[in-house]
Every structure is written in C-alpha cells, then in structure tokens.
Amino acid sequence: MLKIIPVVGFRRTGKTFLLLNTAKRVGKEVSVYIDFEDERIPKRSETLTELSKVIRELYGDRRLYLLLDEIHEIPEWSRWVRRILDSRNYQIILSGSSSKLSSKELPTELRGRSIPIELYPLSFREFIDFKNEKVENLSESLTLNLLREYIEFGGLPEIVLSEKSRKFFILDEYFKTFLTRDIFDRYKIRNRSAMTDLIRLLLNSTYTTITRNFETLKSIGHKIGKETVANYFNYLKSSFFLNFLEIFSPKVKESIKAPKKVMVVDNFFIKRFSSRFSENWGRLMENIVHLRLRRMRKNNPQIEIFYWKDYQQNEVDFVIKEGLNITRLIQVTFASSLDEIDRREIKALVKASSTLKCRNLLTITWDLEDRLKVGNEIIEFIPLFKWLLTT
C-alpha cells in the first residue's frame, strides 16, 4: 500500500529542493510538481478537484509521483490527498509548513497513511560537498578548518554558499520569518515579546525547565501563565527550531520533571543570538553531535537519545538507547590531548558505565585520537571530524 511522504523540518533546510530533485531523478514524464504558493493558483478547495481532472487527462492511469509544495495553502487539502491516495496509483510527496505536516499535527484522515521524512541542515560531509571539496583529498588541517567553519556557521544551505559578510543578514531574515510565520501567525501568539524573550533565554541555557522560564519571564514583567509557557515550549519543538533532551531514568516521572538539555536546529543560531555560547566550542560541538545522532535515527527508529546525571553531579552528554538496551555512552569535549580533558568527564563516563551496564564508551574530541584504560573499562577517543565522516 502506498504511503504519503510528508517532508518536514526547519525552514530553508532544502525541502523544496528535495521535491525538485526527486522529479529530476524519476523523470519528468512520471512526475508532477506544483507549488501552491504560486499567486496564480486560486486558494480554494475546488482547485484540487480541477487539478485531478487535468492530471488524469494528461497522464491517464499511469503510476505518477505527485510532488506538492505548500499544499496546506488550499482548504480541505488533506481530504483530497486521502481520496487521491485511495483511488490513484500515485506516490504523493508533500512539503510545506512543517508544523502542519508533522506527525503530531497531521490531519486525522492522513494518520497511519504517512511516513514523514525529516530534513536537517547539511551534514558535515554534505557541507564539504557544497564547498566543492572531496573528503578523500583533504588534509587533516584543511578538514579541521572546514569543521571550524561548519561549527560556527552551521549547515543551512544558502548560508553555507554565501560570503561571510552576508551570512548574518541571511540568518537574521530566516529568524524573522520563522518567528512571524511559524510561531506568531501559526499559533496566533498575542504576547510576542514574551515568546521572543523565552527564545533568548533558551538559546542562552544549557539546561532548562518550564518552571524556571516561567519564573524568569514573570520577574522581568511579562504577564504570562505557566501553561502558556509550556505551550510555547511545544510550539518551538513542533517548528523544529529547538529540541529538548530528557535525562535518562527508569522512572518516567523523574525524566519528565528533571531539567532538559536545550538543542538547536543549527549552530549559527547559537552563535548569532546567544551571548553565552558564542565562543564556547564544547557547547557548539555538543550541538553538532546531537544533530548527527538525530540523523542516525532515520536508519534506526529504535534509537532514543538522552543525557545522564546522578546525585553527585556526574554527567554524561549522551546516552544512546536502542530498544531495551543502552548501547553507547558519549562525552563531547574540546580537547586535543588527554591532559586537556577534565578528569570529571572520565569519572562520569566510568560511573555511568557501571550504573547503566554499558561498556561502549566514547569521547568525541577536537583532534585527539587515543584509547584509555580505566579500571576494567576502555574509553575510545575520536576526533569530531572523523566521527562525523563515518558512514
């Protein structure tokens, strides 16, 4: 049975490009691409009925790829898509407002009939390709230079290809459009200044809770309820701008109540809008690692990502769980030698290994590659660039 494929993700990550590239790959004779934001297309449900007739007249009953961009602009679009899926031999790929196409907000008639694809900013390998370089031809020093640029300015395609002087202007425009269209307009936010201040607080936070942000917003004069702040958290997550990493605990209540780690869709937002992390390379590296781990879930949906901390404040940056098993513990540190690594990080990794019964211990570094035996445990050290370029 054919499934609908909604392409979701933060804006400007390449959703439209993916649709056009699909049309190029499968061939124009079996693909139909329509951008419903085109001002010439009437924004009424009858448009879709007329479209069905035209497509059938032109292509008959052959197998087709329908590539529909911004289809949510048309009223009753989901009912039409469901009817076409049931009555035609069409592979339907949708793109547009990710908040409206995400699995949580997909209209009822399409649930269970879709397989979403989430797009992220460029991976490091894709970033290198965009720079017209070949991974196999790069020296380590040049690879590290490219990695430094990737960590600072992120992987949003247009920004990657822009001159440094224009990168900030482009990101500012992305941010304004995201706030206006994906947050303020989409969710009908009335207290816009509170939402803007909340985003600033989150971009300057490693850990966060709804209660802490509610109290801070109240203290600076915002008249806002705690439930509203909780809704704002959900809006930011649904828009793919932020993700909140839970602590690993066998007790669900503890996971929910504990502070959550703040992860951002692209590093450039941290550098641009955070006063605390502009030069904090450890924090920026950690965010890059999180994005790579989320991409890995495409090939293995069983993967779950957490962090770990015990009552003695021993902390591990990432706990990887597959099914019922903890399969890897990961620390991230901006270090080039063993002497530069904080011994508390190694102690925490060994403590977590014992507590969580996991012996697959990894520390991702700037350019250190080594192995260290601590008691009965062996910790692998691997440079970030090598880990990112691993298939």
Image (tube, rainbow, N blue to C red):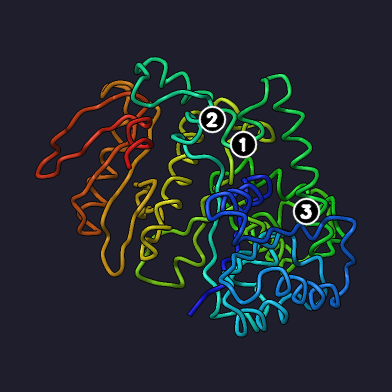
Circle 3: element type: helix
Give the Cα distance between marks 3 and 1. 27 Å
- Which of the 4 quarters of the picture holds residue 210? bottom right
- Going by the image, does 135 lie left or right of 129? left
Q: Confirm whether residue 233 shows in the render.
A: no
Give the Cα distance between marks 2 and 1. 8 Å
Q: Residue at x 56, y 66 (%)?
A: 5
Q: Residue at x 76, y 47 (%)?
A: 197
Residue holding disc 1:
157
Residue holding disc 3:
195
Q: Residue at x 46, y 32 (%)?
A: 282
Q: What's the amino acid at mark 1?
A: Pro
- Going by the image, does 236 lie left or right of 380? right
Q: What's the amino acid at mark 2?
A: Phe
Give the Cα distance between marks 3 and 2. 34 Å
Tell me the quarter of the image containing the C terminus: top left
Q: Earlier in the sequence, mark 3 or mark 1?
A: 1
Residue holding disc 2:
130
Tags 2 and 1 touching, CB below 8 Å: yes
Query: What is the crowding at mark 1: few (fewer than 14 residues within 10 Å), some, or many (at least 20)?
Result: some
